[in-house]
Image (cartoon, helix red, strand yellow):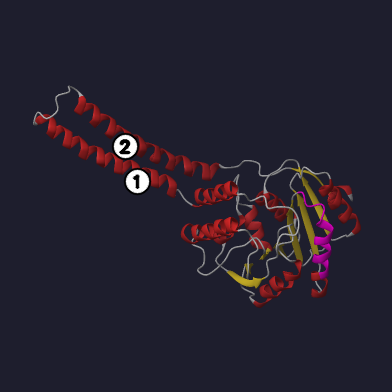
Amino acid sequence: MEAPDYSIVIPVYNSGAWLTKLVSRIEAAMRPLDASFEVILVNDASPDKTTWQVIQELSKERDYVRGFDMLYNVGQFRALLCGLEQCRGKQIITMDDDLQHPPEELPKLVQAMKAHPGVDCVMGEYQCKQHGPIRNLGSALAQKIMDKLYDKPPGIRTTSFRIMTADLAKALTLYRTAHPQLGPLIVRVTRNIVNVPVAHAARPFGTSGYRLMRLVSETLRSVVNASVAPLRFISAIGLICATAAFIIGVYYLAKWLLGDIGVPGYASLIITIAFFSGMILVSIGVLGEYIGRIVQELTGMPRFTIRTSTDETQR
């Protein structure tokens, strides 16, 4: 089968009620471009029964729709990687399923990619984000972390509404980790990234799955995936504690020599506890440094398992 010009990859979760509308708007936006395309819908083990049924119906009605059903819930990022592995397009577009990424903005991404032939990825930069204040704060914090830890190109905003080359998409799928995050991975693989202004719509259906604790968890995960800075921080604390213990030890030793401490063993007990508490933290930090590097090298947990796909049912 001839490769389409574009593959549009969308992880979906409990979105059966509006998937038909989403796909129809994508078709209306892509048809005027006079280019072939496919829409890949990855059902992340939605607990409702309608999402996968709607995907199957869409794939029967429209030959450009392909669906993949996960065996178990793997999360948005791993579901997206599954779609990247299955896509056949020369260029890959990723977007969310909640209609906050207006399909009518797709031509802007395509045109920006054509206008920058040497670029590997074009990311939509939201002109006015329609998230809540907590989500916006979490996104701003994540952007700051990426600036510092991932050596992100200055001035570039990373979003999940983007278009990339097939070569970049392939490189992303080769990165083996149990908790992938596409934005950080992209800026680690390439610096040939540009932004294009796009609209960001209010969520018309349902509620976001990114609650406060999940935003915190994803932010911390991005820090751990990027560097061993937390381990070094613990080591620094341990070193400070050990230094303070040494100073305290000298102080109490002086007091003991001057006869100011009358309780036998008090000075030696304080010195021992303070010193070894600091050294334990140093040791944990050093061991953690090695463990972190080993995990980074050897991580190979299964990222996803496909239960079935519309490709199989249509053979």
The amino acid type, in three-letter code, at marker 2 is Gly
Q: Is residue 212 visible?
A: yes
Q: Is residue 23 magenta?
A: yes
State which tag comes first along the sequence, 1 or 2: 1
Are the residues flagged by discs 1 and 2 in contact, CB closer than 8 Å?
Answer: no
For mark 1, give the secondary structure. helix
> Is 207 or 232 nearer to us in this picture?
207
Give the percent coordinates (x, y) of residue 145: 49, 57
Quadrant hosting residue 88: bottom right
Give the percent coordinates (x, y) of residue 142: 53, 57
Q: Which residue is mark 1?
A: 236
Give the Cα distance between marks 1 and 2. 10 Å
For mark 2, give the secondary structure. helix
Dominant SS in magenta: helix
**In this rendering, position of residue 159 left or right of residue 282:** right
Picture residue at 59% right of the left edge, 71% below the top: 194
The amino acid type, in three-letter code, at marker 1 is Ala
**In this rendering, position of residue 11 left or right of residue 135:** right
Q: Is residue 168 above or below residue 286?
A: below
**In this rendering, position of residue 302 left or right of residue 149:** right
Q: Is residue 309 magenta?
A: no
Q: How many neighbours does mark 1 have within 10 angstroms: few (below 14), some (14-19), or many (20 or more)?
A: some
Q: How many neighbours does mark 2 have within 10 angstroms: few (below 14), some (14-19), or many (20 or more)?
A: many
Q: Which residue is mark 2?
A: 278
Give the percent coordinates (x, y) of residue 37: 80, 65
Give the percent coordinates (x, y) of residue 285: 39, 41
Q: Which residues are magenta?
A: 14-28
Q: Is residue 1 visible?
A: no
Disc number placed over residue 170 in the picture, else none? none
Q: Is residue 134 above or below residue 265?
A: below
The single residue placed furthest to the front in the displayed view is 133
The single residue placed furthest to the top in the displayed view is 264
